[in-house]
Image: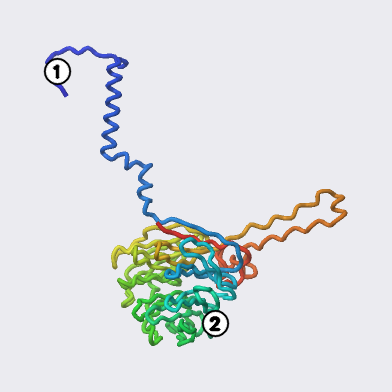
């Protein structure tokens, strides 16, 4: 600013004078430039959400296929790049990268599937258990087990396939090379009735952890001797565990429980079962997985509209709910695509009814020939009767492919 001479008389200039208008224009340009250089424009409400959401999880890809039969588990063969979904009487096979159809294993009614990467043999948890060649998808043999099967798990330290059952025996162990049964575990529970094992995880060194849904605990099993060596009680923080994720490096277990509502993740030490903390989930869980590349645990819930809870492990003692991603009703189980850092969930949804046949054009034509009967409507995939998916909640699908009328299978890939 310049000093004006003392007592100098300044003649006012009208606001509409050309020089004033020019000055106002110059000031506007200068002020705008100052705001941009100061960074105010980057923090505006219009741009902040885009920056904040750039690293958020979201649905990246979906695929939909018509069919019949219910669903339970989904398995990603990360080495062979295939996705296995038991449905109805078959195990459906998809390309893990594109989600396109890649074949099926016929006559393999089951709940879940796994692959032994060394032998190249696949297995599904039915009764009988079906064993197939993962390259040709041709059945090699069927294996009769003592009780109905539910979950399935490949144990890497002993290179064995574990079949989990809510009946006795709770565990049947199979040699994937020849399909021979090499052992069983009658009861992995705490003695309070027959245990209901849901999901298993291995430390890769011979110790296996299995969540026991009906006893609110995690059983610790020696993979070599097939002996239960411990029980970790979860009941002080959560009950009805149905999913289990494992940070092997830091020895942290994430027990995904259905209660307290809406769902709870109990985080504990794998070494001694000491509970570190618990976090609320987006819904009652039916599956958990841990991604060591991102240090995140995931829990899928098919309740309500469907959610995927993302838990960030900041350190072995610090955890937080990082995000809750909307998925789809009934998307209750999940698997991890380690190559693409994607989580894949599955569900079914009702197919629209087939249109009725057109009525006869005229009364005379109707009299000359009987009109074609209307095509029957496709069964409602959410109907509770006859083992329809509705018996387990809208869009959820009957477990293990039992029941389940015509409905779309939805594959949903979630990532960044």
Q: 413 or 148, which lies in front?
A: 413
Q: Above or below — where is 301 with respect to 14? A: below
Looking at the rendered structure, which numbered label has been put on residue 4?
Answer: 1
Quadrant of res 7: top left
Point out residue 163 in the picture as x, y percentages from the top left corner.
48, 80
Circle nearer the viewer, 1 or 2: 2
Q: Say which quadrant the C terminus sits in.
A: bottom left
Q: How is the image coloured?
A: rainbow
Q: Is residue 97 visible?
A: yes
Looking at the rendered structure, which numbered label has been put on residue 299?
Answer: none
Q: Earlier in the sequence, mark 1 or mark 2?
A: 1
Q: Above or below — where is 170 with respect to 36? A: below
Residue 72 as seen in the image, left or right of residue 375: left
Point out residue 237 in the picture as x, y percentages from the top left corner.
38, 70
Residue lying at 31% horizontally and 77% vertically, measured from the top left: 271
Q: Above or below — where is 52 with respect to 337? A: above
Residue lying at 74% horizontally and 55% vertically, measured from the top left: 357
Quadrant of res 335: bottom left
Please give the count of numbered marks on the rendered protein.
Answer: 2
Looking at the rendered structure, which numbered label has been put on residue 141?
Answer: 2
Spot the residue most to the left: 6
Circles 1 and 2 in contact, beta carbons < 8 Å: no
Q: Please tell me how crowded label 2 is: few (under 14), some (14-19), or many (20+) other residues with Cα within 10 Å.
A: some
Point out residue 91 in the picture as x, y percentages from the top left corner.
55, 71
Spot the residue most to the front: 136
Measured in 3D between alpha carbons, the distance from the residue under mark 1 to the one under mark 2, in whole angstroms, is 103 Å
Q: Secondary structure at mark 2?
A: strand
Q: Secondary structure at mark 1?
A: loop
Q: 377 or 362, which lies in front?
A: 362
Point out residue 257 in the picture as x, y percentages from the top left corner.
43, 69
Q: Please tell me how crowded label 1 is: few (under 14), some (14-19), or many (20+) other residues with Cα within 10 Å.
A: few
Q: Is residue 193 visible?
A: no
């Amino acid at each position: 600013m310049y000093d004006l001479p003392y007592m100098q008389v300044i003649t006012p200039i009208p606001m509409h004078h050309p020089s004033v208008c020019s000055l106002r224009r110059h000031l506007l340009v200068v002020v705008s430039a100052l705001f941009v250089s100061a960074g105010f424009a980057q923090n505006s409400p219009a741009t902040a959400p885009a920056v904040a959401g750039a690293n958020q999880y979201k649905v990246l890809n979906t695929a939909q296929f018509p069919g019949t039969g219910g669903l339970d588990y989904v398995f990603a063969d990360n080495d062979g790049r295939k996705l296995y979904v038991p449905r109805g009487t078959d195990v459906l096979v998809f390309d893990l990268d594109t989600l396109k159809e890649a074949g099926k294993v016929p006559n393999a009614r089951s709940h879940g599937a796994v692959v032994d990467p060394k032998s190249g043999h696949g297995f599904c948890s039915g009764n009988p258990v079906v064993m197939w060649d993962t390259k040709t998808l041709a059945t090699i043999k069927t294996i009769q087990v003592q009780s109905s099967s539910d979950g399935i798990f490949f144990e890497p330290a002993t290179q064995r396939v574990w079949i989990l059952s809510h009946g006795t025996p709770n565990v049947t162990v199979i040699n994937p090379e020849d399909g021979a049964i090499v052992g069983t575990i009658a009861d992995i529970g705490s003695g309070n009735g027959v245990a209901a094992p849901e999901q298993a995880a291995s430390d890769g060194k011979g110790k296996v952890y299995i969540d026991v849904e009906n006893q609110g605990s995690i059983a610790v099993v020696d993979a070599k001797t097939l002996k239960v060596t411990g029980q970790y009680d979860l009941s002080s923080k959560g009950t009805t565990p149905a999913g289990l994720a494992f940070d092997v490096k830091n020895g942290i277990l994430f027990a995904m429980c259905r209660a307290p509502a809406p769902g709870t993740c109990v985080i504990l030490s794998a070494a001694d079962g000491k509970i570190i903390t618990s976090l609320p989930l987006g819904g009652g869980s039916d599956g958990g997985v841990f991604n060591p590349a991102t240090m995140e645990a995931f829990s899928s819930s098919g309740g309500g509209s469907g959610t995927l809870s993302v838990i960030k492990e900041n350190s072995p003692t610090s955890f937080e709910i990082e995000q809750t991603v909307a998925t789809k009703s009934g998307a209750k189980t999940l698997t991890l695509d380690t190559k693409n850092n994607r989580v894949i969930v599955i569900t079914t949804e009702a197919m629209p009814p087939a249109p009725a046949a057109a009525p006869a054009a005229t009364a005379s034509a109707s009299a000359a020939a009987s009109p074609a009967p209307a095509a029957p409507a496709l069964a409602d995939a959410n109907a509770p009767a006859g083992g329809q998916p509705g018996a387990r909640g809208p869009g959820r699908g009957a477990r293990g492919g039992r029941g389940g009328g015509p409905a779309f299978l939805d594959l949903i890939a979630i990532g960044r």
